[in-house]
Amino acid sequence: MEDVVVIGAGIVGACAALNLAQRGLRVRIVDSAPPGSGCSFGNAGLIAVDHVAPLASPETMAGLSRMLLRGDSPLRLHKRSLPRMAPWMLEFAAQAQRPRFRRNTRALASLVTGAAQAWRRLLDRHIAAELFRDIGSLYVFEQPVAHATERAQLDLLDQHGVRYENLSAEQVRRDYLPSLTPHISHARYFPGMASVTNPQQVVVRIFEAALAAGASFTSAAVDALRALPDGRVGVTLNGETHPAAKVLIAAGSRSAELAQQLGARIPLTNERGYHVQLAAPSQDTLRVPVSFVERGFTCNPMTQGIRLAGTVELGARGAPDWRRADLLATQFHTLFPGEQAPQVASRWYGERPTLPDYLPMIGEISGARNAFVATGHQHLGLTLGPLTGELVAQLMARDIPAVDLAPFRIDRF
């Protein structure tokens, strides 16, 4: 019998398994897909230590109708999904009200401000260090921002100790992006934002370190979970139930379905996102990763070329709309008109697990002792994966976690 079964071999599951195995526990990782092949494969590759405020905000609500009406908007809501999405959207609107936004910002910042140190602890163990870059990142604004809005944004960054430098359009082109269109307003450089050159390989390295620490891996889908009378959790794989002393559900978009079998209601939705990997122009076009704020996508120079990642589709089901991915390449060409036309080497889409308050869910299922959940990291899985892995290991070992996890509890909705 395993001490712990970790369901999910993405960034969160791999980091949790590593920390649990290093505590001497017998850990089995279970996933039907190879390590790092879900959202961990396709993300933008940024360790976004500036994201101290959740996307469920008064600012988002104020611009929501405008975004939904734009044909090239980074946000798309599928009309046919409105009845199904209505409860989630109503809760999102409630969480975006200023009092709750302030509370949720304090909660998210308590994690994000510790993310860089958690990554450093991982790198100090010589895990994935060759894939890690500490070169900062740019946010480019094509239009001026209202003074009050910008002041509020900067006050949040200052309050939580996030370092930044405000740059003029001329400084951006001179120092960072010489081929960028001159038709921008300004930019903000974050020297503390790190990035990775291959997100999937980062997860593979962490997964391999977990195996080296004594964890095992089973390639299988979890058919069912149930609480056993003796306090253990039964994990059914291929029709056979395996008892485990503890279970961690870190299965991304499937986490809600699995947790429901143990009595937990998790209002998780899937945010569909896309990326395209460019064969040309070369990654040398970009000196640092850059995000275009109004367009809602990020360009990151990686080992296999520039990755353009972003967009949000809510309520999407079925086949992907590859026009959303192709739009990223079109917009890149608009923003870098002096470069050769983008040549797309590959396209990808995936589902980000997202809760209405845009906070992750980290905790033990009430009524199913020894069953834990770590999910809902939306756009911050790579950023928060190492810290979440540490906190989950502390929680499952019945230690006091280094961060107060009350705001992330499972029964908060």
Image: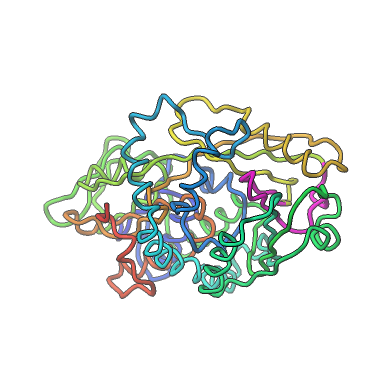
Answer left or right for 332 relative to 203. Answer: right
Which of the colour schemes (rainbow, by chain, secondary structure, one colour) is used?
Answer: rainbow
Answer left or right for 178 relative to 270. Answer: right
Snapshot quadrant of residue 120 = bottom right
Q: What residue is shown at x 61% (from left), y 45% (from top)?
A: 296
Q: What residue is shown at x 56% (from left), y 63% (from top)?
A: 153
Residue 269's place in the image compared with 44, above or below, is above
Snapshot quadrant of residue 397 = bottom left
Membership of 85 in magenta stretch: no
Percent of width and height locating residue 136 = 69, 65
Residue 402's place in the image compared with 212, above or below, is below
Q: Of 161 and 15, which appears nearest the observer?
A: 161
Snapshot quadrant of residue 333 = top right
What's drawn in magenta, residue-wise? Answer: 281-300
Percent of width and height locating residue 299 = 70, 49
Q: What residue is shown at x 52% (from left), y 45% (from top)?
A: 63
Percent of width and height locating residue 38 = 51, 43
